[in-house]
Amino acid sequence: MNSDSHVWHRQIGLVDQRGLSSMDLSLDGDDDGILSILVMACQLGACRIGMGVARLNRSPSDPLNARLTSGLLDGLPETWSEAVEHFHQRGMEIGFSSPQGPVDLWAGNPQAIRADQSAVLWMVHGNGRAVLGSGDMRSMPPNEPPKTMVDAPTLVCGTSALLHRHLMERGLFWDTPISDRWLTLTARLDDIDPQEALELISSKFGGGTATSTVAGDGSLIRFRLPLEETPEDLLEVLEQDRKGASKTLEGPIDVGPFPALSEDGSTSFDGQNLPPSVGAGDFLVLGAGGTGSWAAPLILSGCDGLVTMTIVDGDQKVESHNLNRQILYETRNLGSPKALAAREALAHRFPALAGGISAIPRPLGPQHVFSNETGSEGEEVSLAEIIGEDDGYDEQIVSSLDSMGVALACLDNQSARTTLNRACLDRGRVMVNGGGEGVSGIVEAFDGESCMVCRYGEQEAKSVERISCQEEGARPVISIVTTTAYVGAMMAAMALCVVARARNPLTDMPEARDWASGSIQKRHTGRLPWFEGECASHL
Ligand SMILES: [Zn+2]
């Protein structure tokens, strides 16, 4: 069985995959805008060869001038025919044609807007702001915004919202999300009770679960088959209704790190205190999955100086069902440790910064933060005890915590976020926290005013439940690229601003955000109301 066939496993409970595959999509905008839509549409499995097509308002021989998308694919194409070849190799159908009337999606800088242009949905971005609207684009200010370090994250925030909104307006989301599905083989054993059945029968994938038949005359023993052994078609036999198509947007909305819209309805891309590049900085990225794999390249897109980035991830295997949203991995990385594959991709995409990028294929644990004192589980743990098999990685994790300028929590469980939060509090560093699941996501920063414990409560902050895309053990989650890319991009914008502020306190800082079904709200980030006075966890 071809393991590639499960690329969309994590999203088939959320969206109509056949509807996505057969989608026809017309695109326009500037080159970065079109390319960023294509990258995400390809991850979604949209416009597949023989089923649907994405039509670009370009000619094959047109040069491709991209500045912001270098972190999103291995080697930027030089012409549009090269770009088409790149996506064609990944199963996507792309054609060229001049639009008759409005295109489906338009994305780009205000300078790229032509007077006669309109789109069913458009996204205009610049200077840390991104605006999503429909129809006529002439209300957007035409002046060219200054180049800033957050241009690439802003583009991705905007494209995520644009594409998500498009899927909603096409009615492609299921009415009832299904968090996971799998195939089970059931065997009936007559005259044998369940306990005995479990002792007698097993499969090559391990033991089963057994129950009594209704009549009590035997047992039914069930074996779950691994995803790789399950034909994809069999996972698609479930039927259900799609959500009704959302109405087209009435007025423009803000979808970028900073607002462009005023209460009086006017739009401005002016007046932000954001440098063109972050200069020197030390970024620690904990977790290289859905959100971390977007945050890391988008941070590097805003760097041109002496930058250090350390990727820490204990996940030992890139799996095919990661490829629907984790931007740093390709089929060739399947089976490789995530941190190492991430480093390889980043070094390839940002050769000038490669020397500063390192990877540690181990998870962050309490032993790295609470060494020689009482750990979070109340046990004495020391680094020396943990380093039974000393591979040097534990010491590398501790030294990267000591040197970090900002930490990004792109982790799969609350307990690890709380551990990282403690390490940040001890060192007076900001932790940018983000997470996404299905069509919901959060992005926030912890700067010492509050911590994971006084914001979420002791029990939640120390929960060890792992949110994971593994089938077994951990709770599986549904995941789609529009959510993870938005969260990762907002985290990158925040982390860049944190580092720039360390040198220039006047640098602006994006506010915390909630992402819910493609709409973006300011997130309340106070303490829980019953935390009065001092919080013992972060003093
Ligand atoms: Zn606290």
Image (cartoon, rainbow, N blue to C red):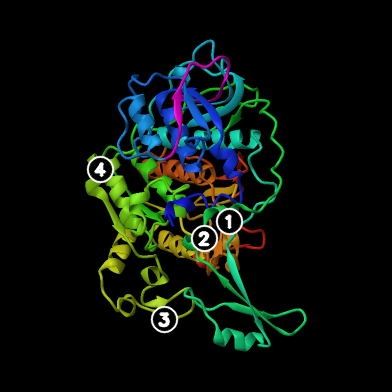
* Image point (64%, 22%), residue name: 265
Quarter assignment of residue 427: bottom left
Mark 4 highlights which residue?
A: 353
Q: Is label 4 in a helix, a strand or a loop?
A: helix
Q: Is label 3 in a helix, a strand or a loop?
A: strand
Quarter assignment of residue 192: bottom right
Depth check, front residue: 404 or 58:
58
Depth check, front residue: 302 or 33:
33
Quarter assignment of residue 39: top left
Mark 4 or 1 closer to N-term?
1
Give the alpha-carbon distance from disc 3 to disc 4, as whole Å. 40 Å
Mark 4 or mark 1, whichever is nearer to me: 1
The kind of residue on which mark 2 rests is Thr
Mark 3 highlights which residue?
A: 380
Q: Which residues are magenta?
A: 91-108
How crowded pointer 3 is (Cα within 10 Å; few <14, some 14-19, many 20+) is rated as some
Give the alpha-carbon distance from disc 2 to disc 1, as whole Å. 7 Å
Asked if residue 97 is among those painted magenta in the image, a careful observer would answer yes
Q: Is residue 200 above or below residue 314?
A: below
Residue labelled 3 has its Cβ within 8 Å of some atom of ligand 1 = no
Mark 3 or mark 4, whichever is nearer to me: 4
Mark 3 or mark 2, whichever is nearer to me: 2
Mark 1 highlights which residue?
A: 234
How crowded pointer 4 is (Cα within 10 Å; few <14, some 14-19, many 20+) is rated as some
* Image point (52%, 65%), residue name: 466
Depth check, front residue: 381 or 202:
202
Mark 3 or 2 closer to N-term?
2
Q: Are marks 2 and 1 in contact (CB under 8 Å)?
A: yes
Q: Is label 2 in a helix, a strand or a loop?
A: loop
Image quarter hosting the N terminus: bottom left
